[in-house]
Amino acid sequence: MRREDEAFRMFRESFNNADGRFHLLEHRVPVEIQKEYFTYSERMRRSKSFAPLSDAQTEVLYAQLQTGEASVAEKKYMLTSLAVSCSVKAFRMLKEYAGQSEPDVADWACLALAELRIALETELSGEKQMFISTGLGGKDGKMRFYVLFLAEKNVPFKDYQRRVIEQEFPYMLAQAGCETESLTVGSQYVELLSLIPFRTDIKSLLEGLIAECNQYGNFLSYRFTINNIKELTQEEINEAVRENGDD
């Protein structure tokens, strides 16, 4: 089995074999910020001086947060303190703040709210909760993926081939329960941003898209790039096209 096939298999099985309720971080938050937040949160929770906030302390902390006078570091500390307090009052405050947070801590507030929501649901329901976070986020139980498809042998697409892609991709994705958020057809490549259900066999889905289009001429390569971290830059796309031409 090729390494790519094994990666797709493991990704799919991780959801099929999981037992519990999934929580998906819907906002796009850079992976670096996610790592920073959860490291910070865990360190706070493990601190010897850590103690859950009382309702009175929660109100004082939130009032300080709302003044707008705190530094970014202070805001991060206050938001994380509210998140690890595991109280309903703190959840209401974080939810309110996340909806109007300042740009410098918007991602941090989103992560704090997500962490507290899962902690409360675990405590109240007794059901196992699973948190899924990716750089591109998701919506309504679907993960957002960026896919770059390439022209076969880098031969520029003809007009009719572009029309085939623009018609077949959204139709077939919808048939599979996916949503097409954006579809860009370049001269030698196709960019797709799509919301895909957790348990979808992604490899089979994408290869099916290619096969369907190739019925009208073998113009799409079976070589594609997919990730749920970020959209590729034009420079990265150009490099992928060059590598495709070198094969």
Image (cartoon, rainbow, N blue to C red):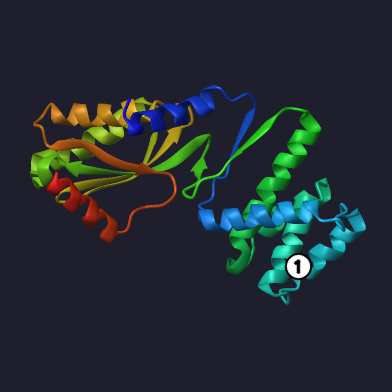
Image x and y of residue 59, in percent:
86, 61
Residue sitting nearer the eye, 206 or 140: 206
Residue drawn at the location 55% of the way across and 44% of the way down: 133
Quadrant in which residue 146 is drawn: top left
Quadrant in which residue 75 is drawn: bottom right
Image x and y of residue 27, in percent:
54, 50
Image x and y of residue 28, in percent:
50, 52
Which quadrant, please, contains the N terminus?
top left
Asked if 211 appears above or below 40 in the picture, the reply is above
In this rendering, the count of numbered labels is: 1
Quadrant in which residue 131 is drawn: top right
In-image side of 145 versus 85 (left or right):
left
Residue sitting nearer the eye, 147 or 68: 147
Residue sitting nearer the eye, 80 or 67: 80
Asked if 128 appears above or below 40 in the picture, the reply is above
In-image side of 4 versus 17 (left or right):
left
Which quadrant, please, contains the C terminus?
top left
What's the amino acid at mark 1? Answer: Leu
Residue identified by numbered label 1: 65
In-image side of 76 versus 137 (left or right):
right
Q: Residues within 10 Å of mark 1 (few under 14, many from 20)?
A: many
Image x and y of residue 183, in percent:
29, 45
Residue 213 visible, this orientation? yes
Residue drawn at the location 80% of the way across and 35% of the way down: 123
Residue 29 visible, this orientation? no
Residue drawn at the location 71% of the way across and 43% of the way down: 117
The residue lying furthest to the bottom in this view is 69
Residue drawn at the location 52% of the way across and 53% of the way down: 31
In-image side of 142 versus 130 (left or right):
left
SS at mark 1 in the image: helix
